[in-house]
Amino acid sequence: MNHILFELLENAGFLRGSTINTDKIARAKRSELVSIAEQSAELTPTSSVNNVDSIFSHTASLSLGGGPTPCGALDCRTKRARELVQFAAFYSDRVFVNNNLFASSGRYQEDAIDEARSAFHDELEIVLILKPMIESGLIVPITPTTTLCYHCLGKTALPDSERKRFDDALRRFTKRFEMETEATLENYGDGLLDLSIRGNDDLVEHGSAHKDWGEIKSIAKGQPRLAKQLEKEQPVLLSKALRKRLGVDTDMAHSLFNDIGFEMAVSQCLRSSIVTSRPIHVEILNDFFRNDAVNRRNTLIQQHLTCIVPFLNNISTSELLTLRNGEADAFISFRQAFAKAVDEHMKSKPGRLTQQDAEEIYKEVIEPELARLNQKVNTASKSLFKRSRAGILGWVAAISAGHYFGFLESGLIATAKALGLTKVAADLAGNLIGISSEDSIRNEKMYFLWKVQHRAQRS
């Protein structure tokens, strides 16, 4: 079913099915881009969402939802969006994501028109990655506010007594950015400045981040010496004093808490747990909402899903959704068992969870259980085969009699002649054995995962 967001984009001519109309974007006026952003917000308010209270309903962080912060590189954004699609298809009832079309509307209004068009194109790239999941209802784009920054929105989800602690946490992280990261400004020759932040992965996603920092002339009046250095087109390492005057660390902390604020407000409003690729989010949120175990579990599963289920990359999202729809009860039973297995592992591992933890869950829980199910199926198959050997002779007799009396369709007769009656009977018996032996594990909790593994092996 075509989601109203895609109807908007197709009616405006920016999309043709699942293809971006680049010619339309290249001719688009600024007002058109802004209008689409505003209309998308009107179509996706949180007030329109009726969510069932479930630990398997999730609010995705801004970055995991394909947003442009903290890393605006399109390849990084698309990678995150694809990871979210896989997570949602395999584990979630629903995932709420920020409506990035509206979130980027400031760029459509303020950037040079070519850059505004490029930004709009990037947002369409992200929304198309999410499209199958949005249309299935497993991913739901939302616009929680059109007036507040997400940092401020997050504070509204807290009681008055907690808001001061939230501000204190923001100041604490401003100090951490100052002490634990390195900031460099560079002019690439066009007068536009790039701010590069380097630090540990804890604070800075994948160790480095880049931000547009305006033009040289915008800082020349207040920082003439710095402006002269930048005109030489050499990177300038910023001192703590300069960082403070330029508001570098305040800006980085505010960006982090924008994400926190979004997760905080939406998860409270829509009664969902949080899924993020950044463990630091869980640690901050746990200071305010005691849902640590669920959020830690979500983070581990999202970050290291293909370590816990290594064959998952060998099955397409559409195949996974087909399996979910066809084996709905088995999926629910599996997911409960899967979550329990992760929770049992976490009990013995306080603190941060890593890829090694994910690999241990696979080796100690998932792999042995799948091996047990395979053994059970093989045993059932052998037993059924023994009982079916005599039956094959019966099939031969039945096919022969059917042929003689004219009961069989001409296509099956031709096949029987080409392959031999025994071969046809054996194939029929083999198919029945496969179905019957699978029935022997249908009520097992990991049956759905076994199905996924076997589908992946055939891909």
Image (cartoon, helix red, strand yellow):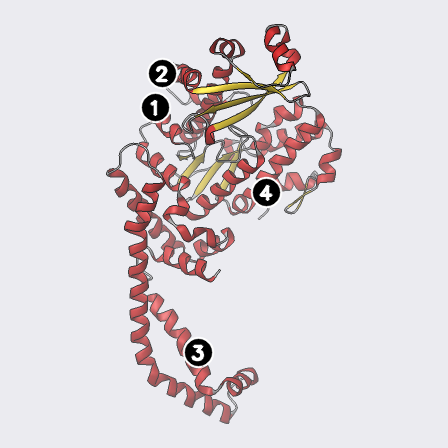
Q: Secondary structure at mark 3?
A: helix
Amino acid tagged 2: Arg
Mark 2 surroundings within 10 Å by alpha-carbon count, few (fewer than 14), some (14 through 19), many (20 or more)? some
Mark 1 and mark 3 lie on one chain; the one further toward the N terminus is: 1
Mark 4 and mark 2 lie on one chain; the one further toward the N terminus is: 4
Residue 204 seen in the figure: yes
Q: Nearer the viewer, residue 359 or 172?
A: 359
The residue to which callout 2 is attached is 165
Q: Residue furthest left?
A: 348
Amino acid tagged 4: Leu
* Distance between the alpha carbons at the discs numbered 1 and 4: 35 Å
Mark 3 and mark 4 lie on one chain; the one further toward the N terminus is: 4
Mark 3 surroundings within 10 Å by alpha-carbon count, few (fewer than 14), some (14 through 19), many (20 or more)? few
The residue to which callout 3 is attached is 427
Amino acid tagged 1: Phe
Q: Is 381 placed left or right of 198 in the picture?
A: left
Residue depth check, mark 1 versus mark 3: number of the one nearer the observer: 3
Task: Tell me if label 1 and label 4 are in contact, CB under 8 Å.
Answer: no
Task: Tell me if label 1 and label 2 are in contact, CB under 8 Å.
Answer: yes
Please provide percent x and percent y for residue 71: 53, 30
Q: Secondary structure at mark 1?
A: loop
Amino acid tagged 3: Asp
The residue to which callout 1 is attached is 288
Residue 128 disc label = 4
Q: Is 349 placed left or right of 186 in the picture?
A: left
Residue 42 seen in the figure: no
Classify 226 as above or below 369.
above
Q: Secondary structure at mark 2?
A: helix
Please provide percent x and percent y for residue 216: 64, 14
Q: Is 386 placed left or right of 136 in the picture?
A: left
Task: Tell me if label 3 and label 4 are in contact, CB under 8 Å.
Answer: no
